[in-house]
Structure formats: structure tokens, C-alpha cells
Image (cartoon, helix red, strand yellow):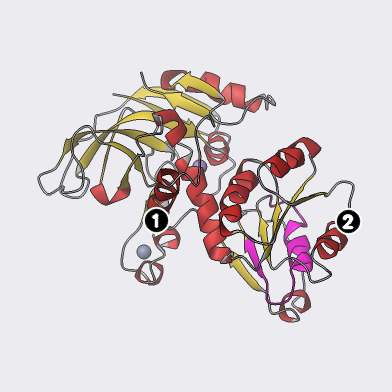
Amino acid sequence: MKAVKIVKPNDLQVIDMEKPVIDAKNNVLVKIRAAGICGSDVGIYHGKNAAATYPRVIGHEMVGDVVEVGENVTKYQVGDRVIIDQVTACGHCYACRKGRPNVCASLQVRGVHIDGGYREYMAVPESDCYRLPDSLSYEDAVMIEPTTIAVQACSRAQVEFEDNVMIIGAGALGSSILRIARLYHPRRIIMVDIDDGKLQESLQHGATDVINSRTEDVVARAHELTDGYGPTVVIDAACFKGSFLTACKCAGNAGRVITMGFGVDPDDINQFVITSKELDVRGSRLQNRKFQTVIDLINQGQVDLSGSISHRFYFQDAQKAFDFNDTHDPSIRKIVLTFD
Ligand code: MN
Ligand code: ZN
């Protein structure tokens, strides 16, 4: 079978690879039908993802058909359409015992630490598969994964109706978080970005207020919009130098600040800004078994992922897809690789 491998940074090759066989653990064989290109895939391609190891078959947004099942498989049958969870964990470390396999001490993410979804077939445990909503095409279904990341952030933030939520960054991640946060009916959702176009889009998707951080004082505006208190939830979906400090300065007493970045540039932050307001600063990494939550939201009509894909490339043309992505053409929303 064919696979897309990043042999080393900036060296993408379509290679021949042995088709996987199912065994006692990896007991479902999935024929991949669509795989999304995510910012982190681009980062691995360009050698900008510190977690990745090479050579690597990348791709962690992977959707396909069950084509073979092991004898002990109970949940799936040949022909089922599924999405595969990218997180694999040891099952017995402290984090795993606490029900948080997404930060397992021996975490192995498909497409990052172990081979991922840019290949024709994958063998995975049935417990890592989730049945797709009938209403969703394979291509649109790749968007379930980014939506799980948004659900994770909102769950770490414990968003509820009493909150004033501020989201820093109105790009793909921030707007996905906006769509989930609004399901909790918080008082306000304030979006922060430097791009007025993205901020306008946020208003159409349920933001109550927007702040352009290039032209406005974010900390002052955030307090004005919340009667002087400050947002009780601040989610940093942008992660640039200074954004963490801004988030902590904006957050109101007893609030939660959620970090999602992997940046290593220090912010000039002191304990006072956290202790004096007794802020909870929490990281949100990947997602913790949130696929079923998102699929349920789709089936209930609360989340609509249809029409999210802007561009499609055959997976063996992955080089073209990544080159096109690098043009940062404004028409790019989501690029998927297709397999037939
Ligand atoms: Mn992703
Ligand atoms: Zn573990």
C-alpha cells in the first residue's frame, strides 16, 4: 500500500509500505477514506514540531471504513464508517489512572510519535474507533478531530452559563472553540484577534464582542465588556509571546486561564497576577476521549461540520497539498487528502 512519509524535515515522500494485519490488540482494519491536514502536520513537515520523530507517516485526522474485524471485536462490523482517535496511552501511569490518557507519561500520538493516517490502511484497537454520523461525508468528518480539541478546552475551562468567556485567536482553533463555547450559553463570548475579517466572522458565529488587539488595549477592553470584573474564562488559542500574560491580566477573580500552545518563549509573568485573583491556570492538550461527545453533538444537530472543507487533494499528491498550504492563500479553510 502507499503512504505519505516525512522522511526528515521538508522531505515528503510517497512510499510503499506493508499493509497492516490485524492482531489481538490492533483488531480492526480501517481503509482510510479521508485525512485532514492540520497545523501540526505542517509543523512536522517543516521540522517545527519538537514532539515529532522521523521518519514518520503523519496525519492524525483520519476517517475510513472498517474492512476487517478480529474475532473478539464486538462494536464494529465490516462496512462501518469510523474516525480513529489519535491518542494512544499506556493505561497504567498516574495520568491514565486519573482518566487522562491524553497526557499519559508514555503518550504516543498517531502521526506524531507513531505512524498516522496518511496511508491506505490502518490496524487499530476497536476502542479507538468511533462511528461517524450518517449525515456526514468522509471529508467533513475529518473536522470531528479539531472539534474534539475545542471540546477539550471548554471542558478544562468548565465553561458554564455564568461565565464571560474570552478566546484569544479567531483562527481555525479559536473559531472552533467559539462554536463549542456557545453551546454552554455563557453571558458573553469575546473574541480577540488582529484580523478584522476573522473578528467579523466570529460575530456571525455567536461571539458577542470582539477586540482587535492591534488597535485596542485588550486588558482594558476585556474589563469594560465585563463590568470591570474581567472574563471568568480566558482561553489562549493563539499562543504568541505575551498572550499568556495578557490572558492572566484579563481574567477576573476565581477565573480560569487555559493554555493550548507549545511556545517556549517566556512571558514576563509574576505570581501576584495569579495568586491575587486565585486563578486556575490549566493546560489543554489534544483531547481526552472526546470523539463520542462531538459525534453526539452532531447527531443532536448542535454542531454542524458540513461544508468545512475548502480544498481536496489526492493523498499521493500530498506534496502539492502541502505546497499549496504554504502559500497561505486566504481561501484556505481546511485541506483534506482523499484516497479514491
Ligand atoms: Mn488536528
Ligand atoms: Zn499512561
Q: Amino acid type of disc 2?
A: Asp
Q: Nearer the viewer, residue 97 or 233?
A: 233
Q: Is mark 2 within 8 Å of ligand 1?
A: no
The spot of residue 202 in percent (x, y) is: 70, 43
Dividing the picture into quadrants, the one containing residue 27 is top left
Q: Is residue 276 left or right of residue 52?
A: right
Residue at image x 59%, y 42%? 48
Instruction: Give how far apart the Cα atoms at labels 1 and 2 are.
Output: 38 Å
Q: State the image coordinates of residue 217 (x, y, percent, origin top left).
A: 88, 56
Residue 231: x and y in percent read: 73, 65
Instruction: For residue 284, say whether it is visible.
Output: no
Residue under pointer 2:
217
SS state under label 1 = loop
Q: Quadrant of residue 106?
A: bottom left
Rendered view: 268 above or below 69: below
Mark yes or no: residue 19 visible: yes
